[in-house]
Image (spheres, grey):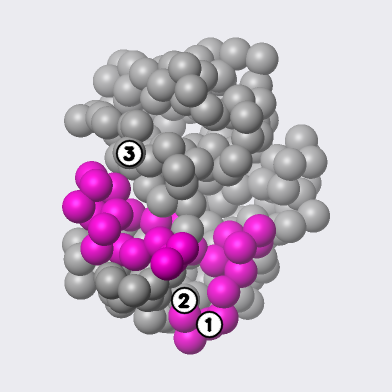
C-alpha cells in the first residue's frame, strides 16, 4: 500500500490535486502498485477514480443526523471513500476511540489505517486489528530525514510487533526518495504513508512514479 496524505497543503488543491490523482492512477497502472490518496477533507467529493483508493484524513466516531461538523463514516462511504487515516500525530484521538473507529470502519467494509508514534504504541494499536498501522515518529515528519535511513530499527521492531496479526505495517516520516521506499520495504514495512515528500515535491508526477517503481522492484 502506497498512501499519499495531502494534508491541507495548498499544493493539493484545485487543478494540482487532480493532476496528483492522475499521476497516481498512471503510476498504479504502470507498476501495479496499490495507491491511495487522502485529499483535503473539503475536496474529497472532487476526487473520482476507479484505479486508486480515496481515503479520508480523519473520521469521527459520530452518528449520522444532528452531528454538525463531524466526519461520519457512513456518509464517507456513500461518497465513494474507501477508508480513513486515524490517530495521525497531527490529529490524535484516545485509544478507546481508535478501537471504536476501527470496528466501525470494519463493519462498513472500509479500510482503517491507524497511526502510531513508536513501537510500543504500534503493538498496542495492532491489538485492535486495524487493516494497517503506520509508524511515524513525530520528530521526523516533514523533516526530510527518512525513518528508513535514520531509524531503521523502528521499522524492524514495529514489523515484529505486528507479526502474526491481520494488521500490516506501513511506515512514514521523511520519506523523500525511491531509495527510502526500497529500504523501508526491505526492513519489513509493507507500504508507506507519505505527505510532503510528494505533495511539496518539485515534480509530484515524477516522485510518485519513482516511489511506485520501488514497490515493483
Residue occupying the point 79% across, 55% down: 139
Q: Is residue 192 left or right of residue 177?
A: left
Quarter of the image where the C terminus is located: top left
Q: Disc 3 to disc 2, how far (Cα)?
A: 25 Å
Disc 2: CA contacts within 10 A as few (<14), some (14-19) or many (>=20)? many
Q: Disc 3 to disc 1, how far (Cα)?
A: 29 Å
Labelled pair 3, 2 in contact (Cβ < 8 Å): no
Q: x, y percentage for residue 7? A: 58, 43
Against 193, is 11 above or below? Answer: above
Labelled pair 2, 1 in contact (Cβ < 8 Å): yes
Residue occupying the point 50% across, 41% down: 40
- The circle drawn on residue 95 is 1
Q: Is residue 116 magenta?
A: no
The answer to which image quadrant residue 121 occupies is bottom right
Segment colored magenta = 68-97
Q: For this rendering, which residue is in front, 56 or 148?
A: 56
Residue occupying the point 29% across, 27% down: 32
Q: x, y percentage for residue 93? A: 57, 74
- The circle drawn on residue 98 is 2
The answer to which image quadrant residue 77 occupies is bottom left
Quarter of the image where the N terminus is located: top left
Disc 3: CA contacts within 10 A as few (<14), some (14-19) or many (>=20)? few
Amino acid at each position: 500500500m502506497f498512501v499519499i496524505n495531502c494534508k491541507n497543503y495548498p499544493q493539493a488543491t484545485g487543478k494540482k490535486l487532480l493532476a496528483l490523482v492522475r499521476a497516481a492512477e498512471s503510476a498504479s497502472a504502470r507498476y501495479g502498485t496499490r495507491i491511495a490518496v487522502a485529499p483535503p477533507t473539503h475536496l474529497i467529493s472532487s476526487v473520482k477514480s476507479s484505479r486508486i483508493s480515496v481515503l479520508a484524513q480523519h473520521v469521527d466516531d459520530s452518528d449520522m443526523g444532528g452531528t454538525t461538523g463531524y466526519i461520519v463514516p457512513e456518509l464517507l462511504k456513500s461518497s465513494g471513500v474507501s477508508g480513513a487515516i486515524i490517530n495521525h500525530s497531527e490529529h490524535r484521538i484516545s485509544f478507546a476511540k481508535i478501537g471504536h473507529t476501527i470496528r466501525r470502519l470494519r463493519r462498513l467494509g472500509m479500510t482503517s489505517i491507524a497511526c502510531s508514534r513508536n513501537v510500543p504504541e504500534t503493538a498496542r494499536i495492532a491489538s485492535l486489528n486495524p487493516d494497517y498501522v503506520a509508524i511515524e515518529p513525530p520528530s521526523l515528519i516533514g523533516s526530510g530525514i527518512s525513518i528508513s535511513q535514520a531509524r531503521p530499527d523502528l521499522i524492524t521492531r514495529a514489523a515484529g510487533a505486528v507479526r502474526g496479526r491481520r494488521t500490516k505495517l506501513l511506515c512514514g516520516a521523511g520519506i523523500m526518495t525511491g531509495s527510502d521506499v526500497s529500504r523501508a520495504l526491505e526492513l519489513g514495512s509493507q507500504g508507506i504513508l507519505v505527505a510532503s515528500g510528494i505533495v511539496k515535491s518539485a515534480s509530484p508526477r515524477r516522485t510518485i512514479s519513482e516511489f511506485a517503481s520501488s514497490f515493483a522492484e
